[in-house]
Amino acid sequence: MPLVTSQMRWLAYRRMHALIHNLVTIAALLERKPVIPDVPCEYIRTVQQRAASTPVHRSRFGVSHPSIVVTGPKDKPVCRLAPGTWRPGGPDQCYHNRIMSQFDYDDFLTSEHVTPAWTPQKPLPNLTLPQLPVEPPAGGDASATEGMVDALKRLCAAHGKSHATEQLLQLDGLLPIRDLLIDAAIGTSEFASERARLASGRPRWRSQLQGAQLRELEGVCPGAKQLIGWRKACVGYFLAE
């Protein structure tokens, strides 16, 4: 059996969060509610910390992770990402008007105003994520940022023309998993420089969608003006500063 190190577990968990990050970024730009999916509990058991201080043995689910809420019976638990909020109870909290959990989405699909417009037999309209730039080199890359903005413009323009009135929309293109965030790339290079980053006091992930880029997107992406507020409210889903 291969050795699984703490760094490998951290990277696996970060890659899962990168998928969530990309989903909520696109949803926010399009003024859509992203559905935050349930997470396999066995996956969390695999990636959670193996420290003596982690009270796994006191959990009836075998899951002890600060970002995971576990519900259901002991023999069939369900794991969900905890709300990625900034401060509980504040006006800018990550409330349900911003995100939808999988269990809420399941109920939503059976509601009276949705059922006539969509059934499991009717495929959802697909919004395909355009090819995005690869990870920029250390220090940033203006051309990579421009390419990302151009790709997002194409995405928003396509959505506005053909899917604006659709109640449900399926986003394709997040898989296979890449070490890439839509607005701030990550990769193995970050781990090598983490100690230096801490010493510098700079944010771990600096968003490439700053004010200038968001102003470029405002004409085609209806949520561009609110993206920074969205990021601050739901910081745990965005992983970007």
Image (cartoon, rainbow, N blue to C red):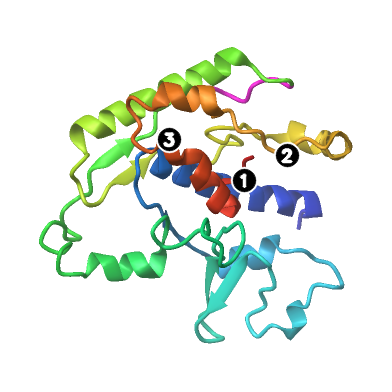
Q: Quadrant of residue 203?
A: top right
Horizontally, residue 76 falls left or right of residue 63, namely left
Q: Which residue is mark 3?
A: 225
The span picked out in magenta is 133-138
Q: Nearer the viewer, mark 3 or mark 1?
A: 3
Q: Which residue is mark 1?
A: 239
Which is more toward the observer, 139 or 15? Answer: 139
Q: Are marks 1 and 2 in contact (CB under 8 Å)?
A: yes
Is residue 5 at least partly visible in the picture? no
Q: Earlier in the sequence, mark 3 or mark 1?
A: 3
Within-10-Å neighbours for mark 2: few <14, some 14–19, many 20+: some
Q: In which quadrant of the rendered view does residue 104 lie?
A: bottom left
Q: Residue at x 29, y 71 (%)?
A: 107
Residue type highlighted by circle 3: Lys
Relative image position of residue 229 (x, y in whole percent): 51, 44
Q: Residue furthest top?
A: 143
Of the numbered discs 3 and 2, the one sitting upstream in the chain is 2
The residue under the point 20% across, 60% down is 120
Decide: few, some or many residues near mark 1? Use Cα within 10 Å; few <14, some 14-19, many ≥20.
Answer: many
Tell me how far mark 3 sits from mark 1, CA to CA. Answer: 19 Å
- Mark 1: which amino acid? Leu
Looking at the rendered structure, the secondary structure element under dot 2 is: loop
Q: Is residue 16 above or below residue 48?
A: above
Q: Position of residue 35 (x, y in %)?
A: 40, 56
Q: Residue at x 32, y 27 (%)?
A: 220
Return the residue at label 2: 204
Q: Could you tell me how far apart the alpha carbons at marks 1 and 2 are, in whole angstroms?
A: 9 Å
